[in-house]
Amino acid sequence: MGQWMMRRAWVGVGVLLTIACGLGVRRIGGAFGEHAGNVAWGVMSTLIVLGVVPRARVWVVAGAAVAIVFGIEFLQLTPYPAQWSAESVIGRYTLGGVFEWHDLVGGAVGVGWAAMGVAQVRRRQTRGPD
């Protein structure tokens, strides 16, 4: 398996783990569960972008992930996500239903956190082992 396939495979594992963590913290409920779930959404969005364009610069990956997070949140100002969320569990988890400004903050925090992690991994790969 080529190096780029291995990178995408690890990104896929990261996406699945992030989904599991996001669903897990949502079950906790309350403010912590909601905000942690939004952070996980931002991390997952970053990993998905990284999986699609693995060689893109970190700031490009982060910018695209923020655009996705914000785009989906602002889409909630229309009636469509609420309708799709009512009809489908997948729709509820991917699109949400109601616009909330703090979802933007949580998503941006998750993107930033994931981007810093990607930058650190790339730095170590370039520099080699200590």
Image (tube, rainbow, N blue to C red):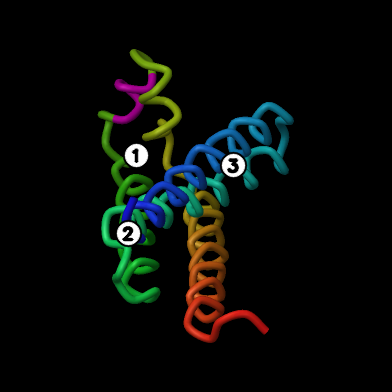
Residue plotted at (56% across, 78% down): 124
- Left or right: 124 in relation to 59: right
Give the labeled residue for mark 1: 76
**Three-letter code, disc 3:** Gly
Residue 34 lies within the magenta run: no
| Amino acid at circle 1 | Gln
Q: Is residue 36 above or below residue 55?
A: above
Query: Height in image: 68 above or below 32?
Result: below
Vertically, is 48 above or below 23?
Answer: below
Q: CA distance from mark 1 to mark 3?
A: 17 Å
Q: Which residue is mark 3?
A: 37
Q: Secondary structure at mark 1?
A: loop
At a point 34% along the width and 53% down the height, the residue shown is 51
Up the image or down, 15 lies above or below 67; here it is above
Which residue corresponds to the image point at 59% horizontal and 42% vertical from the top-left?
Answer: 37
Residue that numbered label 2 is attached to:
4
Residue 97, percent from left and from top: 41, 31
Which numbered disc flags the more N-terminal residue, 1 or 2?
2
SS class of the residue under badge 3?
helix
Looking at the image, which residue is at 64% across and 46% down? Answer: 36
Q: Looking at the image, is mark 1 or mark 3 nearer the viewer?
A: 3
Q: How many marks?
A: 3
Choose mark 1 or mark 2, whichever is in front.
2
Q: Nearer the viewer, mark 2 or mark 3?
A: 2
* Residue 125 spot, x, y in % from top left: 50, 76
Question: Mark 1 and mark 2: span between their CA atoms?
Answer: 35 Å
The residue carrying pointer 1 sits among few (fewer than 14), some (14 to 19) or many (20 or more) residues within 10 Å by Cα, namely some
Tell whether label 3 touches label 2 (CB within 8 Å).
no
* Magenta region, main secondary structure: helix
Q: Amino acid at mark 2?
A: Trp
- Identify the disc placed on residue 52: none
